[in-house]
Image (cartoon, rainbow, N blue to C red):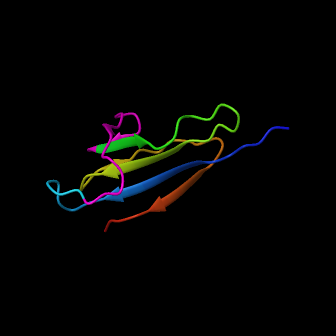
């Protein structure tokens, strides 16, 4: 039996670059392939090879944007903050 489980990312942004009130660590700077401006990724669980599940947090500094890209297995977004 094969399941396709969507990726799940929590997105947050903060208008103050000096103060991060976040549940998760800021993480590593995201690739220019996927982001414009300063965005940071933090994986919350190891990659699951059985269900191909990804769970992570992405933090966007003001003005940062996600570039268009695909998630073949789908994606779930949980927005935790931002304007």
Image position, residue 70 (x, y; %): 56, 42
Q: Nearer the viewer, residue 10 or 46?
A: 46
Q: Quadrant of residue 36?
A: top left
Q: Nearer the viewer, residue 64 or 76?
A: 76
Image position, residue 27 (x, y; %): 33, 41
Q: Nearer the viewer, residue 47 or 34?
A: 47
Q: Quadrant of residue 18?
A: bottom left
| Residue projecting furthest to the top | 49
Residue 54 is covered by the magenta coloring: no
Q: Is residue 35 left or right of residue 50?
A: left
| Residue projecting furthest to the left | 18
Residue 29 is covered by the magenta coloring: yes
Q: Which residues are magenta?
A: 21-38
| Residue projecting furthest to the bottom | 83
At x 26%, y 60%, the residue is 21
How many marks do you count on the picture? 0
The quarter in which the N terminus is drawn is: top right
Q: Quadrant of residue 82?
A: bottom left
At x 80%, y 38%, the residue is 2
The quarter in which the C terminus is drawn is: bottom left
Image position, residue 26 (x, y; %): 30, 46
From the image, give the main secondary structure of the stretch colored magenta.
loop
At x 72%, y 43%, the residue is 4
Image position, residue 68 (x, y; %): 47, 45
Question: Quick check: 14 above or below 6?
Answer: below
Question: Quick check: 49 above or below 44?
Answer: above
């Amino acid at each position: 039996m094969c399941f396709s489980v969507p990726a799940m990312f929590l997105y947050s942004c903060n208008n103050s670059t000096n103060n991060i009130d976040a549940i998760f660590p800021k993480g590593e700077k995201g690739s220019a392939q996927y982001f414009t401006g300063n965005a940071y990724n933090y994986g919350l669980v190891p990659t699951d090879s059985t269900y191909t599940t990804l769970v992570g947090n992405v933090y966007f500094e003001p003005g940062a944007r996600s570039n268009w890209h695909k998630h073949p297995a789908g994606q779930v977004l949980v927005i935790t903050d931002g304007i």
